[in-house]
Amino acid sequence: MQRQIAAFVEQPSRKTFLAARDAVLRESPLPLIAAEIVVLDRMLDQEQYQDMLDRLDTLPPAKVLSPRVHFLAAEAADALGHTTDRELERCLFVVTLKGLLATGDGTSANPYLVCNSSDEHDILEALGCEASRQSIVENAGRMCEVVSCSDGREVWFDVTEVLSPPKLTRRSRVIRRKPVKPRRSRLAR
């Protein structure tokens, strides 16, 4: 997984993003849940910066491809005066957002492939769209969320892995280990 993520960060493209996404979902098919992002946003608003960074460390590996997580980490690092971390997280925010945008064009034929529910919000914001209505539809055997925007546009997201994470295979079985104290990882916050 680390190899694919590093390749994506070094050369962001649709191909490297999808390889990193596949590796992350194989390692841990659990997406970030929207409620967790709400808690993190609240912690940022309440200026609980270090607690928020500590909580980010406990999130599933899918966080590494979430622009929202990198945005929040950058804001907390900035508030704490950690300029190196702030710049790294800002860079990762831009790179992950570009990676998500490279996965499609938001049409029914080519929906954006998201890893986490918060990715939709980040993409809509980048496109300058405001959601007015959402629905889930099946499209070519995949589950898609169709967001109708206030300007009349529709933006399609493939949410198959978010709604029903892939089954663990023999190669990606969960290994139970003794809990260890989480360490702050600069890349996978």
Image (cartoon, rainbow, N blue to C red):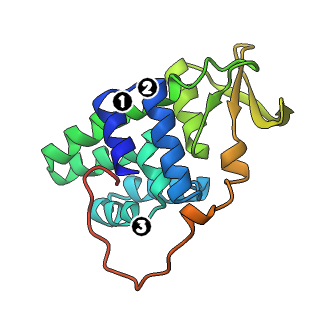
Give the secondary structure at mark 3.
Answer: loop
- Residue placed at 23% from the left, 40% from the top? 88
- Among the two numbered marks 3 and 2 on one chain, the one whose residue lies closer to the N terminus: 3
**Disc 3 marks which amino acid?**
Thr
User: What whole-number distance in Å separates the C-alpha atoms at marks 3 and 2?
Assistant: 25 Å
- Residue 135 or residue 60, whichever sits in front: 60
User: What whole-number distance in Å separates the C-alpha atoms at marks 1 and 2?
Assistant: 6 Å
Which percent across, then down, holds residue 148?
A: 75, 24
Task: Indicate left or right for 71 with 14 as reference.
Answer: left
Give the secondary structure at mark 2.
Answer: helix
In the image, which disc is placed on residue 98? 2
- Residue placed at 83% from the left, 30% from the top? 139
**Disc 2 marks which amino acid?**
Lys
Judged from this view, the residue extending furthest toward the bottom is 178
Q: Which residue is mark 1?
A: 94
**Disc 1 marks which amino acid?**
Val
Q: Which quadrant would the C terminus be assigned to in this image?
A: bottom left
In the image, which disc is placed on residue 58? 3
Task: Indicate left or right for 172 with 138 as reference.
Answer: left
